[in-house]
Amino acid sequence: MTLESWASDAVVALDILSLVATSVAFALALVAARGFRGTPWGRVLSPLPVVFGALTLSTAISVHPATPPDGGSLSAACWIVAVAAIAVSCWRFVSLTAELEVAV
């Protein structure tokens, strides 16, 4: 078995595992965000479904056979959205725990 034969299979398996994991995380983040809606912690959790939705979409794009292996510019845009939502969630968490007012 050459390196190329098992390496490509491993990449596909990890992509599928990542797709399943981010899909489950998206569902759980959506439940958490809705459950804590209207509370200070709800403001911290509200960007998380956006994060996992963007990561799921990015993985789905890169798994599709018609796209380049890295997903191209659409996958990069999904990552930018995910990183921005992570930054918003982190800022709200720090503001909440430092007892600062959380701005919209």
Image: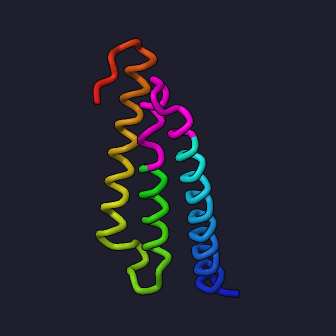
Query: What residue is at 36 percent from the left and 66 percent from the top?
Result: 75
41 left or right, relative to 68? right
Depth check, front residue: 32 or 14: 32
Q: In which image quadrant can residue 86 be found? A: top left
Picture layout, residue 11 above or below residue 18 = below
63 left or right, relative to 92? right
Query: What residue is at 41 percent from the left and 42 percent from the top?
Result: 47
Residue 78: give x, y in percent of width and height: 36, 60
Give the magenta-colored segment's residue range. 32-49
Picture layout, residue 73 above or below residue 9 = above
Is residue 54 inside the magenta stretch?
A: no
Query: What residue is at 37 percent from the left and 20 percent from the top?
Result: 95
| Residue that sits furthest to the right in the current view | 1
Per the picture, the main secondary structure of the magenta-coloured stretch is helix
Q: How is the image coloured?
A: rainbow
The quarter of the picture where the N terminus appears is bottom right
Picture layout, residue 6 above or below residue 27 = below
Query: What residue is at 33 percent from the left and 45 percent from the top?
Result: 84
Residue 50: give x, y in percent of width and height: 42, 50
Is residue 46 inside the magenta stretch?
A: yes
The quarter of the picture where the C terminus appears is top left
Depth check, front residue: 98 or 37: 37
Picture layout, residue 79 above or below residue 68 = above
Residue 35: give x, y in percent of width and height: 56, 36
